[in-house]
Image: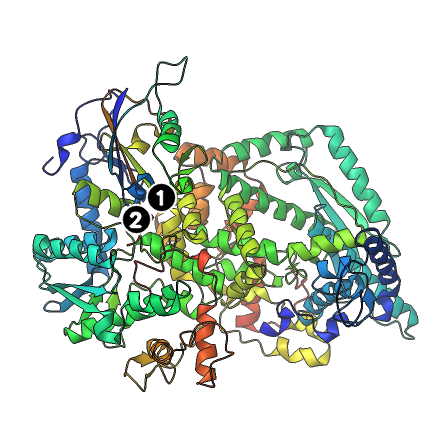
Amino acid sequence: MHLTLEFGGGLELLCQSTKIHSVDVKPKPGEDKLTMRDLLVWVESNLIKERPEMFMKGDSVRPGVLVLINDCDWELCGSLDTELEEKDNVVFISTLHGG
Amino acid sequence: MASCGGGGGECHQSHCQRSEEDGGAEEETRERVASLSFAGDSPTSSATGDGALERCTKCGETVAAAAPRAVNGLCAACFRAYLFGKFKLAVTTNAMISPTDNVLVAFSGGPASRIALQFVHEMQCISLKNWDASKSQALPVFGVGVAFIDESAISIGPLHEMNKVIAQIRSIVSTLSPAHKELHIAPIENICSTSSNDGRIRLNELLDSVTDATGKEDFMKYLRMLTLQKIALDNGYSKLLLGSCTSTIACHVISATVKGQGYSLPGDVQYVDARWEVPVVLPLRDCTAEELNKLCHLDGLELLQLIKRPSNSINSLVSSFVARLRDENPSRERTIVRTAEKLRPFCFNKFVENTYHEFVPSRLRCKFQNINNSETALSEVLCPLCGSPLSEPEVQSLRNIQEKTQTPVENFAAHCCQSCSFQILPKGAESLQQFYTVLPQSVTVRVTDGTSDHSQLGELIDDYLLVVDDDDDDGT
Amino acid sequence: MEEGGATARPRRATGRLCSTCNQRKAALKRPKTLEQICRECFYSVFEDEIHNVIMDNNLFKPGERVAVAASGGKDSTVLAYVMSELNRRHNYGLDLFLLSVDEGITGYRDDSLETVKRNEIEYGLPLKVVSYKDLYGWTMDEIVKTIGLKNNCTFCGVFRRQALDRGAALLKADKLVTGHNADDIAETVLLNILRGDIARLSRCTFITTGEDGPIPRCKPFKYTYEKEIVMYAYFKKLDYFSTECIYSPNAYRGFAREFIKDLERMRPRAILDIIRSGENFRTATSTKMPEQGTCERCGYISSQKLCKACLLLEGLNRGLPKLGIGRARGTNGLNKRVEQRNLRSERTGSNIESKQCGTLDF
């Protein structure tokens, strides 16, 4: 599944200062759907190069990291359980960096 | 106020002097520590100068290395005396227990309430001894009872577990002699109905209608307090003694802040809380959970293994936050409590003076006679769901609503503080009505006469009409 | 959707409608009210709330010259944008300008200043920059070269606070507005409880402080959630700078901040509840503020003979950089009393608080 991932608000520092990543992510073996829960695991192991604790806490993003799926607050579309679709655009923004 | 704290972590001389009365118990501890340390740490500590053995920073007596370091450089006996000293100081300077009192100790089986029970017992023993020795025997010795709340109605554990626990409590209480201590075991559902079965059903219905996890916990805590109050009232107790320690109070300070209860917070953190029918006292306020745990361990006190419900409430988030702060800085809990201490307490945070000052040592009397009663009891309306005094904006909105509302439910809801309205009261008129119907009478009765508490009416009359000979029990 | 809506395409059958206009697709869930709301309605409710806070609290008078503290970060960028917008829309009649502090941190502040300079053009607000070098004779780079990476945040924090006040005074401002948001204030309430600082606890929820001083400061974002500020900046494509300070990359990893964010996830209204607690604390009326005098060297408000900045500078210039930090020992007898007082406020562990850097202290 082709996705565009965007990191902002300082999170880009965790992935070699690249803000936009064009990626292909496959659903877990035996499943045909890719959820945000799966995507987070994938991002943590494939894109985050340092201080993963700034991105994840438990199985979700660290509180204070905002997530938008196609410019819509993920809290409105099911958070971790949101099912992703081809060509989705997922944005992660940290609110934790300086004001 | 600040003088009562037994400041900080350091040990003041007076706390650590071993009074003769405690001798027996301490000798025992000393032996236990000695055996502990010999079993544990062989004298490997290569301290120079004084030799291989560590000295207690208080009594200077040498004790083997293992134990003293675990207790702030004090030997076990001095550590014990230090904690008992803090307890005793809190009791005497706040006139918590007078000779005519009948004290009910709330016992949960945890280390704090276990130590509270132990210390009250020891204090009673000392008084008994003094009474025996005195010629006149004019002053009576205060009585002690123990209350345990059986929450099996709402817990998942099997019934026989509870029977085991109760047997254990009986055996603990029976070892506390001389002076017999009545044990009261009250099922929590009794607050809802006198019939056990009906009570269970009503209690569970009540709790089910509170959807917020934090709200449910806080409401339970309140029902526990009401249950203790009922036991105390029904059995003629004049004081209710809780084992709240620095650590639990520190958590409460943060939780209350987070729930928007900043206004009412100072009322909850004082040594004395007389807003209840039976006044509540917190003599372990200056001891941390860590200290109490340690003492339980040193004294080999038996604790109950109660299953903790898993919780994802704000309260448990707060306690893990406070635990983390404590790991970073062990004195953080004290600092938090000290901050709350600097807030202005309420008029119910002291005893009505004329009842108690005669038993207070003269040097302390002034403390109780110079109370400036600038704040009248009139200003405090208490929330019927948590007992918090309402803040000015809350009282204002209550007055506004009261002008319009007529039904008892609406009136009840209007009296609840903002925090309870959010986390406890069900939303929607129908579920609210249902909730109100199942509420124990001891809760609903708290709003019927405009003010939430009869004792405040009493105080009010005292203040305004100068009624002198009020034969009613002042402690109510 | 006027700005930057290009990436949004119609999708997900479950897309819910805005609870306010009932027409457009909801774009976010408001933490304050839990409403789902579309972008356009979000913009107007976000701006209206700030306008109401300004009006209800009488933050400004027509004709006032107001400095907007601008660091280039999210809060101050959104603040500059919204202030300029509201000033125009509601005819506040304010003479607004951006005030930035150049700490002299190569690769950090010079980049964020670029951001502020772009804001200057975009929002049509003149920019004034005051530098540590000009005010104190030292850049942060030079200070770090002298003292190393320990305590550098103390210097930076003390210097920045004064720099804003001095810059504002220099530029004849009547008021200074800062971008402190609701999350920041909730965190400060908690920190003051953790430190036992009752005087600050009673003040830290004031929307305006320093009214008796030369330049009052106010916080129009006092009730604005950080989440909404970031969402607003994102949707409006506002240009802000979010790189961490190179000298303290982990400064924002505070316990208290993390706790607040955990809380927000569990119960979003908790942030406002903390502020409400802070406003309602029964602080004794007798809680005294330290007497305000002035520093005998620079004339800045100070409760001591020397203000904190001058004390730190004294240390730097005499080659005793620990002066005013650390313990009282080894200070060659300079004003021990002053020092111990100062020490009291500095002693608290740095890891409980967040954002000493990159933000403006209270």
Res. C216 in view: no
Q: Position of residue B260 (x, y in %)?
A: 43, 53
Residue closest to the eye, C147 or B306: C147
- Label 2: chain letter: C
Quarter of the rendering containing residue A66 = top left
Q: Quadrant of the C terminus of chain C?
A: bottom left
- Is C143 located above or below residue B440 in the figure? below
At a point 30% along the width and 22% down the height, the residue shown is: A84
The numbered mark at residue B307 is none
Which residue type does callout 1 highlight?
Answer: Gly
Which residue type does callout 2 highlight?
Answer: Glu
Res. A72 in view: yes
Q: Are marks 1 and 2 in contact (CB under 8 Å)?
A: yes
The numbered mark at residue C226 is 2
At a point 86% along the width and 54% down the height, the residue shown is: B35
Give the spatial CA distance, label 1 vs label 2.
Answer: 9 Å
Residue closest to the eye, B257 or B400: B257
Residue that numbered label 1 is attached to:
A64
Quarter of the rendering containing residue C222 = bottom left
- In the drawing, does residue B42 fall left or right of residue C92? right
- In the drawing, does residue C107 fall left or right of residue B342? left
